[in-house]
Image (cartoon, rainbow, N blue to C red):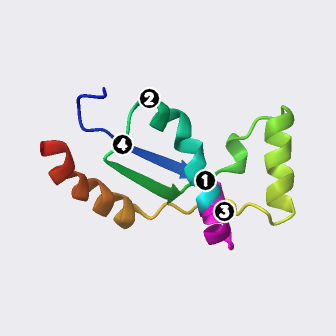
Amino acid sequence: MARKPFAAFLVCITLAMPSADKYREGVTTWLEPVRALVKPVSEGLFAGALDCSKLSLIPNGLSMRAAVAFGIFPKGDHRDWNAIRAWAKGLQSFLAA
């Protein structure tokens, strides 16, 4: 993979939070394991979707439901498909090289 152009993206509900800008730098660190293997030519960070009906009742699911109930994470679909498409279209020049 190190010899081929590579792009990485990350989708998470943290970036849909009202104060997402203050968490953005921390979210970028989640890609460090990928960067340790290969340097992406581009990285996309996007808000995600949270459908509580798909959360399990095991501890992580319950924690997420509690975070939604307390207003920490917003439920619903917060993906900006126009931004995602624009980022993907911008990759053409990187990946064609």
Judge whether 29 appears above or below 90 on screen: above
- Dot 1 crowding, Cα within 10 Å, few <14, some 14–19, many 20+: some
Secondary structure at numbered mark 2: helix
Residue marked by disc 4: 40
Secondary structure at numbered mark 3: helix
Q: Does the CB distance between marks 2 and 1 fall below 8 Å?
A: no
Callout in the foreground (2, 1): 2
Q: Foreground residue, 81 or 51?
A: 81
C-alpha distance separating marks 1 and 4: 16 Å
Relative image position of residue 56 (x, y in whole percent): 76, 35
Relative image position of residue 40 (x, y in whole percent): 36, 43
Q: Which residues are magenta?
A: 13-24
Secondary structure at numbered mark 4: loop
Residue marked by disc 3: 23
Residue visible at 29% across and 63% down in the picture: 86
C-alpha distance separating marks 1 and 3: 6 Å
Q: Which mark is residue 27?
A: 1
